[in-house]
Image (cartoon, rainbow, N blue to C red):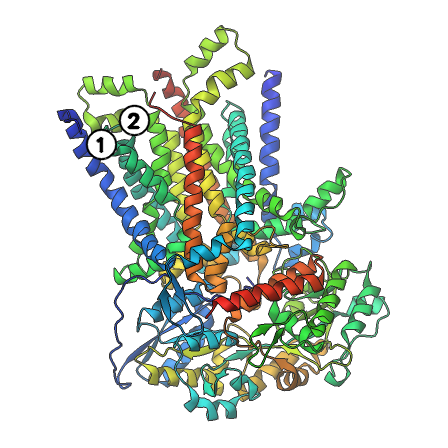
Amino acid sequence: MKVSRVASVFAAALAAGLIFLPLWWVFASSLRPGNSFVENLTPLSWRAFLPVGGSFANYEVLLDGDFARALLNSFLVAGVTVVLGLAVAVLAAYALAVLNFPGRGYVFVFVILVSMVPFDAIAIPLSGLFSTWRLSDSYAGLILPALANGFAIFVLRQFFLGVPQELLDAAEVDGLGRFGTLLRIVLPLSKPALIGAGLMLFLSQWQAYLWPLLIGTSPGKQLAPIALANLSNLYSVDLGQILAGSFVLSAVPMVLLLFFQRQYTESLSTSGMRG
Amino acid sequence: MPTMSPRRWRDARLAVLLLAPAVLGMVAMRVVPAVSAFAESFNHLSLRTGVKEFVGFENYAYLLGSGEFHAVLGTTLLFNLVLNPVIVVLSTALALLLAQRLPAVGLWRSLIFVPAAVPGSVTALIWSTAMQPDGLLNALFAAIGLPKQPFLTSSGQALGSIGLMLAWGAIGYWMLFVVAGLKDIPQAVYEAALIDGAGWWRRLTAITLPLLRRPMAFVLVAGTVGSFLAFAPVQILTKGGPDGSTNLLMYDVYANAYQVGDLGVAQAEVVLLMILMAVVVAIQFRVLREERS
Amino acid sequence: MKLPWLTLPAVLVLAGCQSAPATTPAQQPAAGPVTLTFANADPAATWKPVIDHCQKQLPGLTVKQLNIPYPQLTSTITQRLTQGNAELDVFTVVPAWIRDYANRGFLADLSELKPQAIANAVSPDMVTANEIDGKLLGISPWTTSQFLYYNADVLRKAGIEPPSADPARRWTWQQLRDASARLKGSVQYPLLFDQFDSYYQLQPLGVSAGGGNGLTGDKQDKPDFANPGWQKALTFYSGLFTDGLSPRGITNDKTNALFAGGKAGFIVSGPWTVSNAVKTKLAFGVAAAPVFEGGKPATSTDSWAMAVSAKSAKQAMAKRFLECANLTAAGNTASIKIAQITPTQKDAYKAFATQFEASGGAATKGLSALMETELRTTAVHRPPVTGYTVFESEAEKLFADVRNGSNPAGRAKKADETIARQFARLG
């Protein structure tokens, strides 16, 4: 390896280590029963970061209770959101990036402006609308608001804009048509952006807290962040279990990202054909 | 309007079809409730009598004439002017590092991404613990011979500490989008530059950054909106203090709406917040002017 | 997390009202099956036992829960009730909010239940605290109190005679401060409060120092944290941090864990600290909460109250549900099954207090009698002023800034001005 590569690996590992350190602390603390992790906290001891003498008891309790079912619900809701949300966003982004139609600029500005609306400021009136639309306490009610994700459209449009015009023209000459061009040319070139937009949609549901509570989900449809919040009783809070639950909630997207890394590398090899 | 060619006609019809689901969804899920929220900004509800009345621009006049609101605006602008460029620079730097073919690069990227997935309440627990007077950060400072810092408990450092928390959660996330943009740059361009004898810095400034304009525009704009709307750490950790030093606009909205109960003023603040964001974002687009390649 | 409904500033909002037409609830007779919607800010499990119990007691009753996050509770209730939405019959409120709710016409008059409520309550002021202008508007299923807990080992090593559980021999705040000063160096945190900077926790300091609730005027509608009593309390509070007896920057979700983990000498906290300390096998003791020398003793109190919506068409059944849940021993006992919080019904209270005193062994001896004395004689309710949430959130900013080193006099004056300005906008 060249010196610069060794330096790069070192820098990457250092950055990753520093940024991940707090999560490591969460993991180490989640192995301690109850609130006993505070014992190593003040004054801070190196033991706080060492999971020795711990156990997975918190995880066992957690996965035995409502949390496991809520985790499945979260997977379901987030998964459906990613699939439908990507479909909606890809179509819209393709229209905004490739098609030449009057008012295109205005539609784009509309998408950006709508993305700026703070959800917390409109969640309560929206939940009123959902109850008139009879969508309270339903999976549809959980999923629909997340589909209107302007940033997913935005990020895909930015990447679709990067597809060289000559490639699009060539596809037209080959008689692929607009849909054929999208499926055969544009999407395969945009895997990293699709992963990015997909993660964005996934996380928006994976972390959903306010909305599912506002539309009143019954216990069977509870999502993981709410099950996590329910771990603290009125007067007692078992931080060990909460930390364990948080680590699970944080680790799932990380594992998904690890899994999709191959797609990143693949797109590197296909990018040879751009140019 | 000049007459359109048949091809433009086809494109326009297709565009309506393709955009319909997204636009209809945004109208129903965002615009309709936002309009009712907007209408609220012209009302005042009396807590004494329970009567709601139309007051025109009175809520806006109250805000614009209030010294406290000016301070909130100042804090918010300062916070965003510093934080957003820092996030863009750091996430780009990490992306440059991690878009290379390195051993276990996927693992490093994933580890750096994780903070984005940590539940908000736990982020607050982590950082309040790390920043407490006898916490991790001060232990690290002591190890390298630096004095103890008050962090969230001092009006001089609290805003920066909140910024650090937000940056921690954001840079790995935005890094992914920059990495995606880097992967889009054809290797051939670099090979040509290498043949021309261009050094690392020259390749970065002449090739990489210009070709990253579009993903960076996305990261800057989306990151800016994200920072403008963030309020959870403030709500959980500082409640706008000490001495109002972390009273960011979105937290003030939250406090006025949910604590004070002055919904009219809160919604007027949301409107002003959106105008402010729109201006900042418009400037960002201007600076990173984009054209179809 | 812990006690969200006491630590977070309350919520008083009027949610964006969309243009749904206001429907007048159709009056329906109480006979036959009735489904009540009950909005609260707890996990569903908390209220399930009492709901199950009352559904059995009241044939035809079904209670559907609406579990709403604490910060959104008032806004959701407001939204539903201002829309004339009849799909909300019973909800929980913090007693101090009831004047604001009453002003907006949200609360049904429960006065017919008053004689029964008084007869069943541990202390009559638990009932009258929910009265506005002579009308009973809520019934509290639960209550809270505050004690001074100490780490017995730490005190013994420092040679400090522990404070007493006899309310007649309670420590002064100055005594607590002096004892804490002697613990400096031998324990990480000499003195903790369960909820630093919260009005619930610090109101008794101001009251005991002669400063009242931080309000003045005939109608108690003007802020007054600049008065000498509150200045005394705030200066005392400020000194704890400047002298390093209490920590800055420790968040309230960890205070109990730190005491239970042996990291503190004292903590001023509620009954819940007992189970935490028992769990970690800490050698601890409980004493009466301190008082300012020459002042009258004061302790924090209250929890949720249950209220009936004035817009509900099912008020008759709703009142019977409240009666079952709060005014019968079995119902009230069922309501604390999960929450493990102090009940207000006499017999339910007796059973709870006995078990509570037994739970800590020798450490909690005399605690039952102490708690009863505090609830009957020293408990101070938070003041149900118009705009309570405005008052509370500004007060808590004031306390937080004083903790972090702001000058008590200057900062209190500023808080008074801010609150007065906000109060003026409520009209």
Which residue in the structure is indicated by mark 1?
A: A102
Which is nearer the eye, C134 or B214? C134
Q: Is residue C163 left or right of residue A30?
A: right
Which residue in the structure is indicated by mark 2?
A: A186
Which is nearer the eye, C179 or B202? B202
Q: Position of residue A167 (x, y in %)?
A: 28, 18
Instruction: Please report whichever mark, 1 or 2, sits nearer to the chain's N-terminal start.
Output: 1
Q: Position of residue C96 (x, y in %)?
A: 52, 75
The local secondary structure at tag 2 comes to: helix
Q: Is residue C254 left or right of residue C28?
A: right
Callout 2: residue from which chain?
A: A
The residue most toward the top is B196
Mark nearest the camera among 1 and 2 is: 1
Callout 1: residue from which chain?
A: A
Q: Are marks 1 and 2 in contact (CB under 8 Å)?
A: no
Q: Looking at the rendering, in which quadrant would you find the C terminus of chain C?
A: bottom left
Type of amino acid under label 1: Pro
